[in-house]
Amino acid sequence: MAGLWQARNWSERLAELQAAETELKEAPLRRDVRSLGTLLGEVLREQVGDDLFEQVETLRRLATERREAEFQGDTAKAKSALQQALLLVHQLPVDRAYQLARAFGFYFELINLAETNHRKRRRLAGGLNPNAEPQRGSLQGTLRRMRKAGYTADEALAFLQAVCITPVFTAHPTEVARRSVISKRRRIATLLEELDQIPQTAEAIAQREDSLMAEITGLWQTDDVRLQRPAVTDEVRMGLDYFHDSIFETLPLLYGEVANALRHEYGLDLALTELPTLVNFGSWIGGDRDGNPFVTPEVTQEALAMSREVVWEHYRKRLIAAAQRISSSTQQAAANPALEAAANEYLSQMPGVAAELRERFLCEHLRLMLTCMMLRMGDTTTIVRDEHEALPPYRNTEEFLRDLQLIRDSLTDNRGLRIAEEIIDPLIVESRTYGLHLQTLDIRQHAKVHSAAVKELSAWCEDGSLPPAPSPMTAEVIDTFRTVATVKRDDDPMSIRQYIISGATSADDVLKTLWLARLGGVTAEKSEHDPGLLIAPLFESIEDLENAPAICRQLWTSEAYAPLLESWGRKQEVMLGYSDSNKDGGMIASTWSIWKAHRALYEVARDCNVDLRLFHGRGGTVGRGGGPTHRAIYAQPLNSFNGELRITEQGEVLNFKYSDVVLAERSLELMIAASLDALARPDSKACGGCSAHLTGVALPEWEQAMDSLSAWSFEQYRQDILDNPDTFDYFQQATPVAELEHARIGSRPAKRTGKRSLADLRAIPWVFGWMQSRHTVPAWYGVGFALERFTREHSDGLEQLQRMMKEFPLFLDMMRNVESALAKSDFGIAELYASLVKDQELRDRVFPMLKEEFDRTRAMLLLITQQADLLSGNPVLARSIRLRNPYVDPMSWIQVELLRRKQAGTDQPEDALNRAITGTINGISAGLRNTG
């Protein structure tokens, strides 16, 4: 097996890495895919036998034949290939079906790693050509456009100082894979990266190939299907792993990139410490209790403690490394008196070991100070033996930053600037970002829960009798606020800053939450060391998004709310929900309602003198508000953004965006650059506010068009999908949504109350079911109907839509997201899932309706984009989907067969059947790169 990555000529290999031409630059990816497939085939033979390998190859060949025949219009050949495949699958024992699903799923695990490695490879290649134009989406590219538009260096820096992005990690849905599987992925990814090293010996390549074989073998022998649903603390650990794996290393590199971009474009030579804080991190994992009974006050406290320990351990390692590298002696370079005084103050608190520490660090005052800081960070490896002489832990970030600044000042004042910039500055940047808590933990609960608690507790006050024991739900609400109060009083008040009210429908929802918070002992107002508790309403449904501006105006002009708003410096956060609004009204209505609510909220905020920050609750998939981040941020309304942005990062995309230093840096840079782009709008400035290409200007006729499209698509979506009981019955039977609980993907139940209704079903399983069955309905239904009607009712309708596609960022973003979803749909596969619907009349009512709208949407999109095929403008994604389909299709065939057996109530063990179905769920998710 050795030699799969061996180069015939290392110059040719280098040329591939530097290539700009598509065919040559994709050669390394093709080699990785081919070689990994070869290794996997060998592992399958070793672990299971030749029979499994041959069945994998047969199914792959039949899938390819079917796809090619359909492309060529050979219906008979396509039908024959499909029938052969279905016959083979029908005869499989359940254990073999599980093994086949795993085999195909593992192929995608490896291919995803290869594609991710290629993204890193191309990012590196992009930096090798100093004359290349920076990409749109890069910070340097944005700064260059700003410079060309006439912005000065001071103006550019002022815009940058207004930018701060906060990715908020969530766990619904959490990453499908177990942590042990993720760790193996990372080792494989590292080996792939090492195989790109130029040059290396044949022996080194062979050794790495052997290591890959061992990792793939270990992956095969590891349970990919969870035997138990993960606990919330498991999800917390999974989120924290990304700090260890990439983010800690990424942050200093990211700020280095910012400094380099400013130097290249504006000639500014700034130290890292002179840059504004551009990034903070947040989390919902362990704080989001909306519909999740497993998120208790105890779990919240544990999540906070886990985050705190992660960042304190990180600081200890950084301080130890700094003490090892900074060996400056006062015999060679002086130390500042302020630093010496601080070190002496620390020693005075440890009289029993002061003399020993002075002797140990004789003339090395910087090392002495770093050692004292390590002690305050809880280091247990020093010479302090008496716990009564241990230094008190840091109480707040300011104390830690003060000590770091003393070290930096001493170095810079005594010819040690280079040392300070190399070692201390990155630590200062980190401490400004993470504080002593690592990430803020948002608390979230539903407005209905608050209302019930207020009603119950108010009744006690009114009748004047001794209150009975509160209901469990009300007790949990009060206990949650008591936990928040305890954390803010006894631990780090910065660790909890936001309280999210989901399902908010009125200003009273905020005031009720405030009343409950005070009852639980929380001081929501800002004080000297406590930022307070920002209470943020989350508007989710189409109706609530439309009402949001009026609700906020009522709240921001309320006398009862005014003191709280003043204490926050008139800052307010409002969250917009993408997933539920899409489920509620379809793609166009959701997109347009959010955009209009966004703009109107900023107008109201200006009227009420409120400093507004929006929190965008985007999902991972298109049907839940997902899509390219830069494009989405730039598509915000003009003059409705202050540079601060909070955005959810769903569990299923965390691995794709933060599993590696290069990927994490790129993800964060994209958000910073997009925020700067949306704030400065250099394209609009360059043309004097004209409506030229993608300036962000929304012409009145475009808004009128969007109003019409939204209304028509909303009406059609509600009629055919949401208000049509046939569609929900079809969905329950023709998708694997009922199997979500067996997949044990996350800790949260799929339904809010356990009722069997579409209203009770969460947006996540709604999108999951349609995605797995290749319908992807939420991402496009109603779009084609609305677009077609617009062109029919307006003589220049098509031309107007085509112009909007070229010049209106929101419309472009929406249509490209729809296009991506259409490309991942497959109604040939969806028809097999439809066959699971027992009532033929029901099936014949719903499936043709879905298929008709799919065809209409596809045709209209191609007409508007003036393309011959989907994704013609995105050949990388098109190629990826085309190459993946022959491997995804067999897993869909197997899944349908297993679901059919489960419906029939076969005598096969249910556990084995559930495990096999879950194997197909994992595999299809890996193949489509979306869980739902």
Image (cartoon, grey):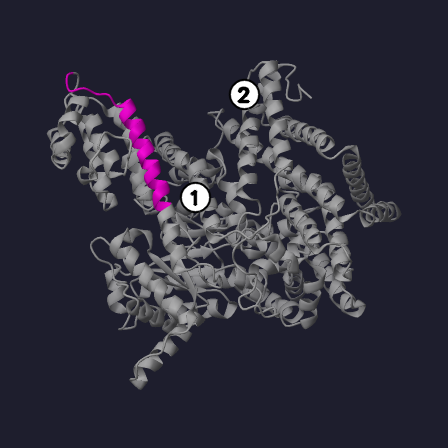
In this orientation, does residue 527 appear?
yes
**Residue 197 - label:** 2
Q: Is 308 included in the stretch rendered in magenta?
A: yes
User: Which segment is the magenta one?
Assistant: 307-331
Specify whether 273 is left or right of 389: right
In whole angstroms, how far apart are the C-alphas of marks 2 and 1?
30 Å
Identified by mark 1, the residue type is Leu
State which quadrant residue 616 falls in. bottom left
Using a 10 Å C-alpha cutoff, classify the residue at mark 1 as few (fewer than 14 neighbours), some (14 to 19) or many (20 or more): many
Q: Quadrant of residue 846?
A: bottom right
**Sequence-wise first label, 2 or 1:** 2
The residue wearing badge 1 is 240
Q: Identify the element where label 2 is drawn.
A: loop
Q: Main secondary structure of the magenta part?
A: helix
At label 2, the amino acid type is: Gln
* Above or below, 335 relative to 480: above
**Residue found at x 52% / y 61%:** 592
Of 276 and 604, the residue lying toward us: 276
Q: Residue 743's mark?
A: none
Left or right: 367 as drawn, with respect to 45: left
Rendered location of residue 71, percent (x, y): 79, 44
